Image: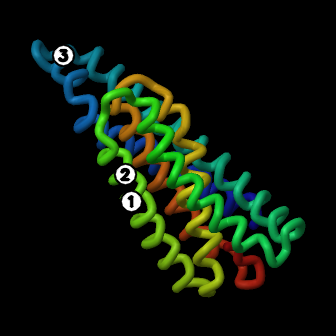
Amino acid sequence: MNSRKWVRLFLTTLWIGGLTTLIISFVFKYDSYAEVLKPFQLFELFGLLLFFAGLGFIFSIISQMGFFAYLTVNQFGKGIFRSLWVPVQIFLIAFTLFDLVYFRYQAAEGASIWPFLWTAIGLLGLSMVVAYIKAKETKWHAFLPALFFMVVVTSVEWVPALRAQGSDYVWLMIIPLFICNAYQLILLHRITKPSEKAA
């Protein structure tokens, strides 16, 4: 990938992260907007919009760092584990989903396990859709590496929000992260030469 294509990928992902976070902030941070709309405070509203857009840019950069780290890890995994890399990825996907349910449930005293279970199921289901699209547009053995990226890497990138207090930032972060990761994964093979396709 030449520098022009990399800049295109970087900038489009950056704007997707910023715009997505800004849009969903109207849902998950409605109270913050309500405070500056009643009474209407123009400068405070402008500052709030800048804050959430900037937060989205940060989420986008985290996503891009995770994506390029994944490309490196995937190549190392193929070289080190060879034929075992497939079961290793399956194990890491399963462990990550287990971690999203069990350890978060243990940390949340008195909470129901169902929200954590549905979160993991939702992440797996949407990741499978993205991995299917990736495999259909490239080659079918790209399905598992794509699923690994969407589940494991996205979860690792999500850790700061999972440790934060309150569920609003949990959702405010995961949605842009997931969209940015899916965008990069699907776009990669479209902006590289056929001989350079990566899973």
Instruction: Report helix, strand or loop for mark 1.
Output: helix
Q: State the CA–CA distance, disc 1 to disc 3.
A: 35 Å
The residue under label 1 is which amino acid type?
A: Ile
Mark 2 lies on a secondary structure that is helix
Between 174 and 148, the one lying in front of the other is 148
Vertical side of 13 occupied by 159: above or below:
above
What percent of the width, then of the height, locates residue 175?
A: 40, 48
Residue 19 placement: quadrant: top left
Residue where numbered disc 2 is placed: 117
Q: Looking at the image, is mark 2 or mark 3 earlier in the sequence?
A: 3
Whole-percent x, y for residue 13 in the image: 53, 52
| Residue type at the position of mark 2 | Leu
Q: Kindly identify the residue that appears in the image at 59 percent across and 55 percent down.
A: 95
Q: Residues within 10 Å of mark 3 (few under 14, many from 20)?
A: few
| Residue linked to disc 3 | 35
Identify the residue under disc 1: 121
- Which amino acid type corresponds to the residue marked 3 in the rendered image? Glu
Q: In which quadrant of the rendered view does residue 105 lie? A: top left
